[in-house]
Image: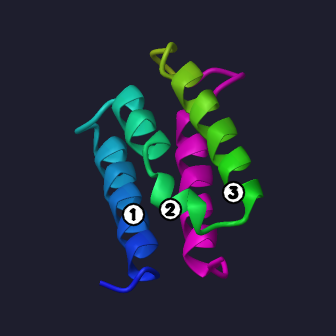
């Protein structure tokens, strides 16, 4: 498998995890854990991608403490932002 194919696979795994989270099949904590362990994906992206992903995951984990949407944390907005991150990561040039 070519080296460049590996990050795409990682992005696909992250996309699948996000879809599972949206359906309620997995928890925010489980998704965050999966996302934080995708080192191959982050190694091929500019450093800012890792920083932004960490911030989004921190907010997602904090939002999981609330049972409903709150003024501080909108889980649906966070999931939309994670989808945007995935879309941008797919389009980003690889190092």
- Which residue bears the numbered disc 3? 49
Of the numbered discs 3 and 2, the one sitting upstream in the chain is: 2
Neighbour tally class for label 2: few under 14, some 14-19, many 20 plus, Cα within 10 Å:
many
Decide if residue 39 is on the left or right side of residue 57.
Answer: left
Mark 1 Cα within 10 Å, few/some/many (few <14, many 20+)?
some
- In front: 52, or 1? 1
State the separation of the CA atoms marked 3 and 1. Answer: 14 Å
Lower position in the chain sequence, tag 3 or tag 1: 1
Q: Residue at x 59, y 42 (%)?
A: 78
Residue that carries the numbered disc 1 in the rendered image:
10
The dominant secondary structure in magenta is helix
Position of residue 62 in the picture relative to residue 30 (left or right): right
Q: Secondary structure at mark 1?
A: helix
Residue 8 in percent (x, y) is at: 42, 74
> In the rendered view, does 56 fall on the left or right side of 2?
right
The segment highlighted magenta reads 69-95
N-terminal label among 2 and 1: 1
| Magenta region includes residue 36 | no
Q: Which residue is mark 2?
A: 41
- Which residue shows up at 63% across the image and 20% down it? 70
């Amino acid at each position: 498998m070519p080296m460049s194919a590996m990050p795409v696979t990682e992005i696909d795994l992250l996309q699948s995890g996000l879809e599972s989270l949206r359906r309620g099949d997995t928890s925010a904590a489980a998704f965050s854990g999966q996302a934080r362990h995708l080192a191959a994906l982050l190694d091929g992206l500019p450093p800012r991608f890792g920083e932004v992903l960490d911030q989004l995951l921190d907010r997602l984990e904090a939002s999981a403490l609330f049972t409903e949407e709150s003024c501080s944390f909108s889980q649906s907005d966070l999931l939309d932002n994670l989808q945007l991150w995935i879309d941008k990561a797919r389009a980003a040039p690889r190092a």
